[in-house]
Amino acid sequence: MTATIARRQNGGTLDNSTAIARNGTEVPLDIGCPFLTPRTTPAQSVHDLRPDDIRLVLGLGDSVMAAFAAEGIQDNTFFNIENAYENRGVSFAMGGDPNAITMPNILNYYSHNLYGASVGEHIISICFGNQICPQGQYRPKIDVLNAAQSGARSLNLDHELDYILDELDDLYKSGTVQRTDWKLLTLFIGSNDICHSCTQPTSLPTTFGVNILAAVERVRTSISNVLVQIVGVMRVQDIVVASSNFTDYCRPIKGSDFIGHDHECECSHSVYNRTIMSTYFPQYNAALQGVVQHYQSEEFLADQSFAVVFQPLLVDIMSFPIQAIRYLQKKNICNIRQKYNLTSFFC
């Protein structure tokens, strides 16, 4: 599937462009690499997949996966409804907007009928509290198979899986895809768990690991022919520290003393609580790695249609220039913000 959803460029014009790869094939992103020689027979094992074997991409996660505010502050003002958009088409793991440097667009270069990538943008869809994710927030024509919800914690993964399973059922019934098609599911969640680790027992590393395992097991028993890649968590508290070092960066809304920075990631605004977050941080990644290790037994390795891998996220936020977390223009799709989906939600 080639993404053709319109995206706004600077000046309000629309961009429906796609790229033409060197062999004349229309793709959303031309990465300039040689194409693969087609297989003579389809892949028979999850342990023998190539990029061109993947037919569907699926996503579970939070605001980073949903690409909330990934294209930065709009019109240089806080009071713009587009500042509350999820720019899903540029999500690093699920975006399908033309020319966006995303995993699905790279896969689409090899797998021309790829399905599932998000396109375009819509108002934020959000989860509150432990298990409060209001119904009716998904926009299937935009989200497609990206079930991420801003604010989501590991407790909310069942809600996200409900959406994916319903969408897959509709796709199977319509004949758009087949149950035997190979799927790549990316799971990237944990920042909101860490941000509540000083106040919410349901977000502590042990419970987090239980929730992740339950979600992956539900995937295993409900979705056929799927490779699950779990992305490690990052030191989200460092965003607050990095931005706080610049007095001109986080300023009150004009005419008030309200600073958004002070109301995000509740555990990050004191040295004591940031110490708690730093102490727990490696335990969250250890929990994710423990889930992957659970599926390394002979019983699961013998399953040729399911596997889980861990992708560490080696991001040193403190090494980024402050501009990487703030005002970057939409036209610069190769910037750090979209590479890592580091958004302006802390200011």
Image (cartoon, rainbow, N blue to C red):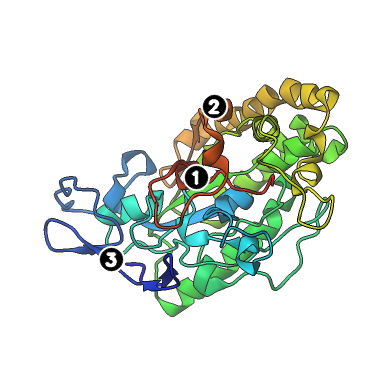
* CB atoms of marks 2 and 3 within 8 Å: no
Q: Badge 2, how many Cα within 10 Å: few under 14, some, many 20+? A: few
Q: Mark 2 vs mark 3: which is more N-terminal? A: 3
What percent of the width, then of the height, locates residue 342?
56, 43
Q: Amino acid at mark 1?
A: Arg
Q: Which residue is mark 1?
A: 337
SS assignment at label 2 = loop
Q: Which residue is mark 3?
A: 18
SS assignment at label 3 = loop
Q: Which residue is mark 2?
A: 316
Tell me if 152 is positioned left or right of 106 in this view: right
Q: Mark 1 vs mark 3: which is more N-terminal? A: 3
Q: Which mark is residue 103?
A: none
Q: Mark 1 vs mark 2: which is more N-terminal? A: 2
Residue 226 to residue 17: above or below: above
Tell me if 31 is positioned left or right of 121 in this view: left
Residue 172 to residue 292: above or below: below
SS assignment at label 1 = helix
Kindly identify the residue that appears in the image at 44 percent across and 61 percent down. Answer: 117
Residue 280 to residue 162: above or below: above
* CB atoms of marks 1 and 3 within 8 Å: no
